[in-house]
Every structure is written in C-alpha cells, then in structure tokens.
Amino acid sequence: MQQGECVDSGSTAYMPTPMLEEITGTNLLNPRMKVSWFCNMAGVQRFEVWVARSSGAAPSNTNSGLSDDLATLHPNELPARDGTEGLDFSVFETGIVRNLNPGNEPHFSFTLPVSLSDEYTVLVRAVGVGGWSTRIAGAWSHHQKFSFATRKVGLSAVVPWPDRPLPPKEDFHPGIVGLFLGNSSPLAPWKGNAVRIGEYVDSGQGTRVSDVVTLEKYFILPNTRDLENYLYTNDLVTQAEPLESIAGLILPVALYRVQVTNTKYPSVPGDIVQVSPMMEKIGQFDHAGNSNVTDPFIAILPSSVTGLPRTVTNSDEDILLLDRQPVLKGARYKYLLVRFSPTREIERVIATNTVDVP
C-alpha cells in the first residue's frame, strides 16, 4: 500500500506552467507590487517567485508571506531568455500550495515592497517536493516588468464612466467583460458564456443574424468592413508594437477559463481550460456589399441584448469571443485572455470579472 505522495523524480513534463498576470502597484505611501498568477495545482508542492531589480540591489520580501532568498550564490542569472539578460534574481518560495487555497481555486497572489526608483522583473515557476535546486521544477512563466514610474504614464483617452459600474480592466481595456448569454439572445437555443473584446457604432441598418443551410449562425454587417478595426486596443501596446497592421490590437489572443468557488460549488477542480483557439484573425468574407462574419467563436450582438455599459462613444454593437464549452448550471467562472506578442510569446494575461451561470 502506498503511503505519502507520489513524486516523479526524473521528469518535469507533468509540472504546469503558471500564467502570470500584469503586476499592479498598491500606493505611493507604502509602495508594494502585487504579483498574481493562475496555475493548475496538480503535482505542485510550492511556487518559486523569482524577482530581480534593474539596479542590481537585492529585492525585499518584508511582510510578503514568502520565504527568505533561496539563491545561495549571486549573481543568480537565468539562462538565455529575452528581457532578463544580466539580471540578478532572488528566489522566494511560497508555502505548500494545498494550504494556500483551500477551495482549490488556481489563483495565487503576494505583495512585495518596492522602491519607487527601480524596475522589477518577476517570473514564477511550479516546483515539486524537496529543497532548493534539488527538486523537480516546471517551466518558468513569461516574465513581467514593473515600476511605479511606467505605471504613471496614462495615454488613453478619458472615457466617461456609465451609470452601471464596470469591473476595472485597466490592464488592457475597460470594456473587456465576461457575461452569460441565455435564451433571450439571438444565439438561442445555444446558451453559454462570452467575453466582450470590442464594440462599435452601428451604421443604422443593424447587424443581422442568419442561418446557413447547416443551421449554424453567422452575422451579416450591412457594410463591407474589417471587424478587427473595432476590436479593443491598448496605447502602451501600440508603442511597443508599432509595425503591426493594427498597432495595439488585442489579437492574437486565446481564451481560458477557471471555475471559482461559490455557495453551490464551495470546492472546485482547479483546472485551467483553454476554450478557444489562438485567435489571430476573425473569419469573414465580403458578399454583395455585406461583410459576412462566419467565425464560430465570434458573435456580434446589440447592446440591448448584452446589457453591457458603453466604453466607446455611441457604440451599440458588442463583439464577443464565445466560450463554446459547456458550463455548469449554478457555477461561477473567471476568464483569462492570454494575449500574444508578434513573436507569439505571451505578452500578458487579462483576467475578467467572474461570470455566474443561472
């Protein structure tokens, strides 16, 4: 009879890779950065949080709940990896994973003190049972950089907030919202969850939903247009990717979801599930002066159906990325938009509000 935990001492293949969210700051009076990530907990004993300062000074872990620096030799540099060259990393360890989130939600976060005059680079990886440098370690997450100086730059136009509040989504665009679509939507009898990734002002004729011979839904826009021109963009991404056909565009992106706890499901599996392919383009074609959107993962619905507040002036049509996987009645989900750079590296992870399924 087996006693204790099973440990694969020769392979890292089973270890999941964390998805690191964009780092946020707390306040200038007590400056700290919040490091958050999503990761399946299967086979994971702890996480290592790797932190480096551009000045070369040692990062602090005061009141973070993390261990002291595990790296016994400095400089502790990563092997060749773009964006981390020459940085000296301290390595902090979390507690045992199963004790961090009793409800099994695969979301983790810690705050660490920061200097207002320095830039920080952070990565996270999952590790197995054992001590520093001798245990199994999974792949590093993509890295995130943070400094209060860069976060002070605000280039987006000021958008007046609507009467109904939106969850804060300043990490890419405030219009990114998850929602449930029921029997009242034109997609019925299909019901499920979706995430808004764009909106636009209708030309006046309305967006029609039609059935093809296969009885599948597709959308006809009255005028020939490239729908990608109406997807959300981000000003800071525009500066970083100026050579793209639409600079700062949310594409390419892939949609993931995690189930989170609620009163009906106080404990959840903790799996992170990919529910869309990598969306690099939206499937559509022009016919008889109309633009026909045929992508099965895209829906275009009027604001009267979605009920979402406007973040684009006078917009009345919402572009939705659909979760085509079944959802549990009474369950609660959070969505993760994983955006990729032009080189197809993960550029950022955009977490949505939670979505309740009636």
Image (cartoon, helix red, strand yellow):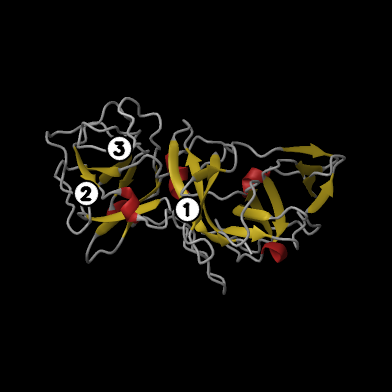
Whether 189 is drawn above or below 255: the answer is below
- Residue at 40% x, 37% y is 16
In the image: residue 21, left or right of residue 232 = left
What is the three-letter code of the residue carrying label 1?
Ala
The residue where tag 1 is placed is 351
Check whether the beta carbons of the residues at disc 3 and disc 1 lie within 8 A of each other.
Answer: no
Q: Could you tell whether 161 is left or right of 227 in the image? A: left
Q: Helix, strand or loop at disc 3? A: loop
Q: Quadrant of residue 56?
A: top left
- From the image, state whether disc 3 or disc 2 is nearer to you: 3
Q: Residues within 10 Å of mark 1 (few under 14, many from 20)?
A: many
Residue 349 image point, x, y percent: 45, 46
For the question of whether residue 249 can be seen, the reply is no
- Specify few, some or many for label 3: CA neighbours under 10 Å numbering under 14, 14-19, or 20 or more: many
Q: Which residue appears at 59% of the width and 37% of the height?
A: 277
Mark 2 and mark 1 in contact (Cβ < 8 Å)? no
Please, which residue is most extreme toward the front here?
1
**Residue 196 percent location from the top left of the image:** 60, 54
- The outermost residue toward the right is 213
The disc labelled 3 sits on which kind of residue?
Answer: Gly
Where, by quadrant of the figure, is residue 30 drawn? bottom left
Query: What amino acid is labelled 2 in the image?
Result: Asp
Viewer-proximal residue, 1 or 60?
Answer: 1
Q: Is residue 268 left or right of residue 328?
A: left
Quadrant location, the C terminus: bottom right
Give coordinates of residue 244: x percent, y percent.
Answer: 52, 36
Q: Residues within 10 Å of mark 2 (few under 14, many from 20)?
A: some
Q: Which mark is residue 118?
A: 2
Q: Which mark is residue 128?
A: 3
Q: Nearer the viewer, residue 139 or 186?
A: 139
- Alpha carbons under labels 1 and 2: distance apart: 26 Å
